[in-house]
Image: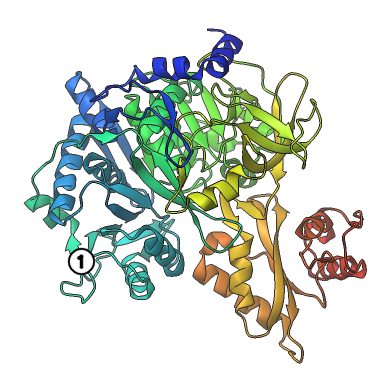
Amino acid sequence: MNYQDVYDRSISDPEGFWRQEAAKLDWFKAPETILSRDEDGLDRWFAGGRLNMAHLALDYHVDHGRGGQTAIIHDSPVTGRQRHITYEELRDEVARFAGGLRALGVEHGDRVVIYMPMIPEALVAMLACARLGAIHSVVFGGFQPHELAVRIDDARPRALITASCGIEVSRVLPYKPLVDEALQVCQHPPTATVVLQRPECEATLHRNSATTRDFDWERLMKDASPVDPVPVDATHPLYVLYTSGTTGKPKGIVRDTGGYAVALNFSMDAIYNLDPGDVFWTASDVGWVVGHSYIVYAPLIHGCTTVVYEGKPVRTPDAGAFWRVIAEHRVKTFFTAPTAFRAIRKEDPDAALMTGYDLSSLQAIYLAGERLDPPTYGWIKDITGLPVIDHWWQTETGWAIAANPMGIEPHREKSGSAALPVPGYRITILDSQGTPQPPGRQGNIALGLPLPPGCLSTLWGDDDRFRLSYLNAFPGYYDTSDGGYIDEDGYLFVMGRMDDVINVAGHRLSTGEMEELIGHHPAVAECAVVGIADELKGEMPLGFVVLKEGQSIDPEALEKALMEVIRTKIGAIANLQAVAVVDKLPKTRSGKILRKSIRQLTQDRDVAVPATIEDPSSLDEIREALEFIKVGRYAS
């Protein structure tokens, strides 16, 4: 196939293109209408078609002779256990757990929150919801009760599914106390909580709580009857996945069922060059969009074997962990975040721990979640000699916007670039007035409407916020809030965000939410949080605070207190790099904090003074604070 021909057809005849891709799936009722608009004026794919995601991922393969193939390899170095689950075994387990959920009152359209570690039962829970037509909302197991409670209140679930614990390297993290605390503070707790007991930590179950009741996973499974897949409309939400917004309230990304299934199946061929039976390992977590798309749904829809890894790139037991998994399970395609390889490089710069592993099965390495910096790209390339594919996408899109189309026509790699637009996406660089920019000129990265199948359909319960967040800035386009440029060869270079969401080890975190939490401290009058470059994690949050008049709190004590509140309320991933006390923050004359200028100062001592600044001396305050705390360019 020729990439340009495939891409051009996806743009000139999107309905014909995606009708052909949709025909590759097993629908209960094939869609007659491919692209339409609902009564609210929002684009919809495959309206009128009916299908079920669990059927596509499981029953279809069993019915077509693949029941004995391994669907899941669970590799858990933190427990020393492994488990192989066939498609038939997984289908039967999912069908029975779906029956257990139905016995608890979960039906089509109900929401279910899932708060699980990286174990096969997390996938069983997601697929069981899909089997019933229930809408799952997975919350990353490392999030603290406050974050969990916010998501519960927005989703208003019928049930919550959790495990007794997660395991971080050698540390057991009990989940049930965190869940109980969240349920005590949320306004809309579920009526049932299902708990999988793990041998490393047994949770106490509450049988007759006033607001909810706990159920043991194994007992629920024992008493349940399996259920068949429930046909749902293609536009029916499969899940709600919360991502941080630029304000404190998370945004519930709504993913429809039909468009997502079609897009994921297409991507497995076009981007990842995978066939049924191949082993695909995505080293992420089901709590993030990468886990939803490429640990769970895409590999299983496509008939691949997916690796579910419960461990870290280093310390489980060492920086050779990834090579061991690839060799042992004969992984063909590997996908992770650049921060994982930065950690490996730091621990094993000469890749000595690769020695002795047979990596002949591995054909390509894919990176996403943050920009792949050229030094890390070069290191991976040097030690493996394999294609290293930096591709770019967002929680909102659910699959890649730009990539090297390895399954269509592989192109040469360019360090620092996410390569070419994926078929279906019209990528345009716009200036602040919405004018398209020529090759080489930086601006806002925008996507022409309609977005291809698989992208978010709206925000949960908030169409107005969806339009405001993504559609209003540039009419006719989806605003990615990222900036970059397209070169003369059509390659996209993503340079950074245009908003105030920072990227910590591939996880998008809201600085607005951090500022809200910091602002609650009784000594703080106002504050700003920005991302500062970090060699290992890409970015780390850095706080600047202005104290209230008359406050004389010790700066070290304040920093310690603010670091603790961020860790407690958001999680360890959001650990503040440092907190600096300043007399004033740079602001515009209208009172807007100039965060971009603060970020620039962390990288360069000399920055242009914005024309709109109220007090230029405020930049000197930030510069002096950075010199005092010795971060960024001021570390030496």
Percent from the top left, x then y, of residue 16? 45, 14
Residue at image point 71% right, 88% down:
553
Q: Quadrant of residue 155?
A: bottom left
Percent from the top left, x then y, of residue 105? 17, 56
Is 562 left or right of 197, judged from the image as shown? right
- Return the residue found at the far top: 1
Residue at image point 77% right, 38% down:
431
Q: Quadrant of residue 192?
A: bottom left
275 w.r.t. 495: above or below: above
142 w.r.t. 80: above or below: below
Is 161 left or right of 427, judged from the image as shown? left
Total numbered labels placed on residues in the image: 1
Q: Is residue 296 visible?
A: yes
Is 501 left or right of 25, judged from the image as shown? right
Residue at image point 61% right, 12% down:
4
* Mark 1 closeness class: few <14, some 14–19, many ≥20 residues within 10 Å: some
Q: Nearer the viewer, residue 295 or 430?
A: 430
Quadrant where the image shows the C terminus: bottom right
Say which residue label 1 marks. 214
